[in-house]
Image (spheres, helix red, strand yellow):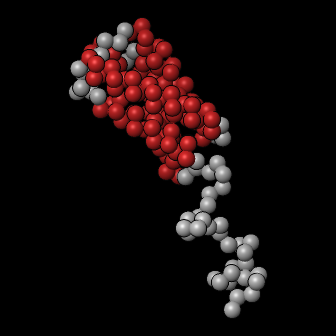
Amino acid sequence: MPSAVECCDGASPARRPLRSPVGHRHRPVGAVSVAAVTVILFTAVMNAAVAVGDLVRARFVLATSEQVRVPASWLPALGAAKLAGAAGLVGGLLGLRPIGIAAAAGLTLFFVCAIGRHVQTGVLRSIAFPGAFLLLALTSLLFFVRG
């Protein structure tokens, strides 16, 4: 029979990992999993890369914006929004969780609108790109919100 100081597996209570009633280990408040960090960083890098494309008016960006009838004059602002979102995601990973949540929510809204614009203009052959970015932004938002 284990003593009051020992657990059934021989570990003292101070050395036992914390467990929830269903047996899952608790993570410290604010801890983020490796999967979450990977997805969030990937989302940030991809948005930063596309933002640079917007800012330098890359050929593929100009072609797509023309197809969905977004004026080229909007590209700097759209690029800046994506770049701010990418920076906010990194800030969220560095401990500024509310900034990360706001950035992920902003990118989610941005790409919902982008998909809406593709649907509105009937340009469906390239809708997978904003769709993929939407999934990344939404996944990042869920990781930040769920902690």
Q: What residue do we see at 61% from left, 67% from top?
A: 19
Which residue is at the front of the view, 17 or 126? Answer: 17
Q: Residue furthest right?
A: 5
Residue 45 x, y percent position in the rendering? 48, 34
Q: Quadrant of residue 2?
A: bottom right
Is residue 111 something one can see in this rendering?
A: yes
- Residue 33, above or below 124: below
- Residue 103, above or below 78: below
Q: Residue furthest bottom?
A: 1
Which residue is at the front of the view, 50 or 36? Answer: 36
Is 137 left, or right, of 26 in this rendering?
Answer: left
Is 65 left, or right, of 84 in this rendering?
Answer: left
Q: What residue do we see at 51% from left, 28% from top?
A: 106
Residue 91 x, y percent position in the rendering? 62, 35
Which residue is at the front of the view, 144 or 71? Answer: 144
Is 147 left, or right, of 127 in this rendering?
Answer: right
Is residue 56 something one can see in this rendering?
A: no
Which residue is at the front of the view, 129 or 3? Answer: 3
Q: What residue do we see at 49% from left, 51% from top?
A: 35
Label count reads 0
Residue 85 x, y percent position in the rendering? 53, 28
Quadrant containing the N terminus is bottom right
Q: Quadrant of residue 95?
A: top right
Q: What residue do we see at 44% from left, 25% from top?
A: 110
Residue 33 x, y percent position in the rendering? 55, 52
- Residue 3, above or below 81: below
